[in-house]
């Protein structure tokens, strides 16, 4: 395979979720092992650890459970990121914890994902953790969910057991905002329907998990309509060959930018046209998310970090008052009237939480308007007031310009991740 072909393959980011001992780490280990994506030294290390544990075969979960505590307890605590590739696609996996107390870690792992793998134990069916993780995937606007009904070997590969889980999940999923839900019966331990089909479930005519991951359509998931280019820095080389060069560098969050396009710079409101779009020193015909580029304009406009280049007839909203759904990540409970730093695209402003509207019971999806105390792993809808207007969109419309992070000014710790509902 040539280098160009390798670079041209698109990237799928997916997260795994499920209750403790549903087999997430084993499933990822099986994916890596059967797709020949494990280095020899990794394989040797895991084989040696498995032997020390007295196991007859390789413990596949050890390929992802990297922390000492995880290996000792046999659980996932932190978010473990793993990379692998096939001739068709590149993948980044976020293996997230199953315990309720690590909900914040699951949100961290899922925040950039295109797809969520929800594991369900075929013996137990849909449980509270299944609903919790599915709701978080829906909240984070993950477009695709694959429900892997695992441990089919423990229910004698029963089609009836699979259909029962599918029916339970479909009934619950009517409450979710997810466009694409698929079901695959698997045995991560034995390898059935993970990379290879196996011989134990002739009644299942669908694709294997790896084939589904390789072929699922994700290119239309990004917002290509609303042009948003938050300026990260202004480039002035001060070199003789670039004496008058003034470029605006950053990452395209949504939309397509081309030479000659009419644009508006926010918050100033000045209009101009794009003179050129560069990636490194190469001029491009067009650029789209998530490319990092430099844009030059036909007019000299005072632009600085935090400004945003948009279309004249399609602009981001400007507001100091935001309604935000947050996941609280701090060990300390939220204190009313406390001030925070708020990070949004390339902006950093100070803010204050004005009101807690309600908390969400993730297991029932009901709103709790009585209990306004927000502690670690709670998900709540709040009102925020910022010291200066932010250029943003609702999270449902644009994940990049609709997300915020709250940072404690005293400790510099991230205390919450949020999704803008409205302004």
Image (tube, grey):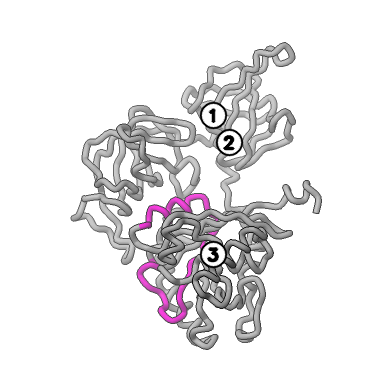
Identify which residue is drawn at 35% across, 69% down.
128
Look at mark 2 in the image and give the residue it sits on: 251
Start-end of magenta stretch: 102-131
Look at mark 3 in the image and give the residue it sits on: 180
Residue count near mark 3 (Cα–Cα under 10 Å), binned few <14, some 14–19, many ≥20: few
The residues bearing labels 3 and 1 have C-alpha atoms spaced at a distance of: 34 Å
The residues bearing labels 1 and 2 have C-alpha atoms spaced at a distance of: 8 Å
The percent position of residue 263, horizontal first and vertical second, equals 59, 29
Task: Please indicate whether residue 249 sits to the left or right of residue 381 in the image.
Answer: right
Residue 234 figure quarter: top right
Provide the secondary structure element on which disc 2 rests.
strand
Is disc 1 in contact with disc 2, using a CB cutoff of under 8 Å? Answer: yes
Q: Quadrant of the N terminus?
A: bottom right
Q: In this view of the protein, can residue 391 be seen by the observer?
A: yes
Q: Nearer the viewer, residue 414 or 29?
A: 29
- Which of the two labelled residues, at mark 1 and mark 2, occupies the earlier sequence position? 1
User: As displayed, is residue 118 above or below residue 41?
Assistant: below
Provide the secondary structure element on which disc 3 rests.
strand
């Amino acid at each position: 395979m040539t280098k160009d072909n390798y670079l041209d393959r698109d990237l799928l980011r997916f997260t795994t979720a499920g209750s403790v001992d549903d087999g997430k780490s084993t499933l990822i280990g099986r994916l890596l092992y059967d797709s020949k994506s494990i280095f020899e030294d990794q394989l040797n290390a895991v084989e040696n650890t498995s032997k020390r544990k007295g196991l007859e075969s390789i413990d596949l979960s050890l390929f992802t459970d990297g922390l000492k505590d995880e290996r000792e307890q046999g659980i996932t605590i932190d978010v473990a990121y793993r990379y692998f590739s096939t001739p068709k696609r590149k993948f980044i996996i976020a293996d997230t914890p199953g315990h309720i107390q690590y909900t914040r870690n699951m949100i961290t792992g899922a925040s950039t994902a295109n797809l969520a793998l929800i594991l369900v134990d075929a013996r137990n069916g849909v449980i509270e953790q299944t609903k919790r993780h599915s709701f978080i995937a829906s909240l984070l606007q993950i477009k695709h969910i694959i429900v892997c009904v695992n441990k089919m070997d423990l229910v004698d590969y029963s089609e009836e057991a699979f259909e029962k889980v599918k029916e339970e999940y479909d009934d619950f999923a009517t409450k979710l905002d997810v466009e694409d839900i698929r079901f695959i019966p698997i045995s991560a331990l034995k390898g059935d329907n993970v990379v290879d089909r196996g011989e134990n479930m002739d009644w299942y005519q669908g694709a294997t998990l790896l084939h589904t991951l390789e072929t699922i359509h994700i290119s239309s998931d990004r917002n290509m309509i609303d042009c948003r280019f938050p300026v990260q820095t202004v480039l002035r080389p001060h070199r003789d060959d670039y004496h008058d060069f003034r470029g605006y560098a950053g990452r395209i969050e949504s939309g397509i930018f081309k030479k000659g396009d009419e644009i508006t710079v926010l918050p100033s409101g000045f209009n101009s046209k794009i003179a050129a779009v560069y990636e490194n020193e190469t001029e491009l015909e067009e650029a789209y998310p998530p490319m990092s580029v430099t844009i030059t304009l036909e007019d000299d406009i005072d632009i600085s970090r935090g400004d945003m280049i948009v279309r004249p007839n399609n602009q981001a909203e400007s507001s100091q008052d935001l309604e935000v759904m947050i996941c609280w990540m701090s060990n300390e409970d939220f204190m009313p009237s406390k001030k925070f730093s708020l990070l949004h695209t390339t902006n950093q402003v100070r803010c204050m939480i004005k009101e807690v509207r309600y908390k969400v019971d993730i297991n029932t999806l009901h709103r709790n308007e009585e209990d306004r105390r927000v502690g670690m792993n709670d998900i709540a809808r709040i009102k925020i007031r910022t010291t200066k207007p932010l250029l943003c969109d609702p999270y449902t419309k644009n994940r990049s310009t609709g997300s915020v992070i709250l940072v404690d000014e005293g400790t510099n710790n991230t205390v919450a991740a949020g999704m803008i509902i409205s302004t």
